[in-house]
């Protein structure tokens, strides 16, 4: 890249390109988006699909091919991204430091990054690409004794599914895509016991539609300035689509294309209203299940082996060889008896600025701040961090999901890739010096 002397990436993992989402080693955990929509390489929309075919990946994974499209394994998308980065790592254009960042501060108009080995790196531009924070946790879990706590696992933990018996009843806290991943893992290890999905709303992700329909609907109107108007527009467009034999999924595909400009057009109060009243409904329609996971859920619900419970987890107690999970529902208190509890809740983005040690230090120094919506870090639409006074920092940027406060839709690969392109173009064109060092600090 022109005017960039060196790019240093701090990432404790052995390989770049996977992060937490695509570092999965289990063959049964799949992308929830068809391969032709995983547009991670600017200017090459079919790059991932082409790689799947030329690398022979589809030959060893024929289950990826469905009527709704090709839904590859997450680990394979991670391998694809590694392959894209390999030439830059081999040439030295990107330096991968396999250590966690400990502190970040300012020194003589530069950023000083100290890693776990106490080595330091100086950079002119710093990009925080720290991804999603850890999953939210109920306060109930913090009160468990060690014996009971040992039977409660995060689904991303390496040993989360070890020791689960085929007929063990399981409680999964969460009912979103991570819960569907957990169901897929249980299915892969031959589990045939009862499973309860618990969440506050009881909503599960919706399935994809087959038929290869194109996005349907136009959401570019400047009049969509309230949550109510936006909801009415979506409902009317779905009705119009169904009258023409077009599935509602095509409407949400069109909505996704304009989601960022719609978010930016909503006043602060309307953004809060959307998050409070509509966000969960939007999420389950926008972030849909891979067909393989949808089939497992549908079969489980049809046979009664899987059920969805709506409520809040209030306590967990050990009762012999079982756990008793108390749940507060609309109709009162109920209990679920299980052998293991798997945590599949979404990330806790509130107070984002304190979820990692170095972010906490930057927050204390006034360099970054959590946003008012509980979505990530305060920044502008370019990705520049905002000070308490609202002024942008021209050398400190936010990339990926933490920048959702400004951009709204910033979870899917195409949106993240587009933001990265715009950010890098901005940085390069604003470089005043002939050489620059850019440091990117991803999830640790």
Image: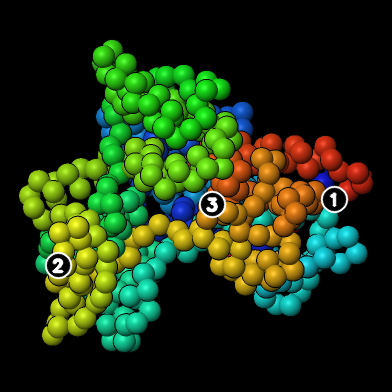
In the image, is 132 to the left or to the right of 86?
A: left
- x, y (%) of residue 310? 22, 56
Circle 3: is it few (<14), some (14-19), or many (20+) Cα within 10 Å?
A: some
- x, y (%) of residue 239? 29, 20
Residue drawn at the location 75% of the way across and 37% of the way down: 425
Q: CA distance from mark 3 to mark 1?
A: 34 Å
Of the numbered discs in the image, which one, if any, rests on residue 436? Answer: 1
Is disc 2 placed on a helix, strand or loop? strand
Is disc 3 placed on a helix, strand or loop? loop
Of the numbered discs in the image, which one, if any, rests on residue 334? Answer: 2
Residue drawn at the location 13% of the way across and 48% of the way down: 301
Where does label 3 land, which residue? 373
Residues tagged 2 and 1 counted as in contact (Cβ below 8 A): no
- x, y (%) of residue 268? 56, 42
Q: Residue furthest front?
A: 269
* Mark positioned earlier in the residue sequence (3 or 2): 2
Q: Quadrant of residue 34?
A: top left
């Amino acid at each position: 890249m022109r005017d960039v002397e060196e790019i240093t990436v701090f990432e404790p993992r052995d390989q770049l390109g996977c992060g937490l989402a695509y570092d999965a080693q289990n063959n049964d955990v799949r992308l929830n988006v068809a391969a032709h929509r995983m547009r991670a390489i600017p200017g090459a929309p079919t790059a991932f699909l082409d790689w799947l075919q030329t690398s022979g990946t589809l030959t060893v994974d024929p289950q990826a091919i469905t009527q709704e499209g090709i839904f590859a394994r997450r680990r394979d998308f991670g391998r694809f991204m590694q392959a894209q980065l390999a030439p830059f790592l081999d040439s030295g254009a990107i330096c991968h430091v396999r250590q966690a960042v400990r502190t970040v501060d300012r020194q003589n108009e530069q950023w000083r990054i100290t890693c776990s080995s106490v080595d330091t790196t100086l950079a002119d531009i710093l990009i925080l690409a720290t991804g999603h924070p850890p999953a939210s946790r109920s306060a109930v879990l913090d009160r468990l004794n060690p014996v009971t706590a040992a039977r409660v696992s995060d689904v991303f933990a390496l040993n989360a599914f070890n020791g689960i018996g085929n007929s063990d009843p399981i409680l999964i806290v969460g009912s979103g895509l991570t819960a569907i991943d957990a169901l897929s893992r249980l299915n892969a290890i031959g589990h045939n016991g009862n499973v309860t999905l618990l969440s506050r709303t009881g909503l599960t992700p919706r399935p994809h539609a087959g038929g290869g329909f194109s996005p349907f609907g136009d959401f570019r109107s400047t009049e969509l300035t309230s949550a109510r108007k936006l909801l009415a527009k979506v409902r009317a467009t779905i009705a119009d689509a169904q009258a023409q034999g077009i599935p509602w999924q095509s409407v949400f595909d069109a909505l996704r294309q304009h989601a960022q400009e719609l978010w930016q057009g909503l006043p602060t109060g309307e953004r809060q209203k959307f998050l409070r009243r509509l966000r969960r409904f939007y999420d389950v329609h926008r972030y849909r299940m891979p067909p393989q996971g949808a089939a497992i859920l549908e079969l489980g619900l049809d046979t009664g082996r899987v059920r969805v419970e709506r409520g809040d987890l209030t306590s967990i107690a050990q009762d012999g060889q079982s756990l008793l999970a108390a749940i507060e529902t609309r109709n009162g208190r109920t209990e679920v008896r299980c052998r293991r509890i798997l945590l599949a809740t979404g990330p806790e983005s509130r107070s984002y600025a304190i979820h990692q040690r170095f972010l906490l230090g930057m927050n204390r120094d006034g360099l970054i701040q959590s946003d008012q919506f509980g979505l990530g870090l305060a920044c502008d639409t370019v990705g520049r961090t905002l000070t308490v006074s609202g002024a942008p920092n021209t050398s400190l940027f936010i990339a990926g999901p933490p920048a959702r406060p400004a951009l709204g839709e910033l979870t899917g690969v195409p949106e993240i890739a587009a933001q990265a392109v715009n950010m890098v173009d901005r940085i390069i064109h604003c470089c005043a010096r002939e050489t620059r060092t850019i440091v990117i600090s991803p999830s640790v």
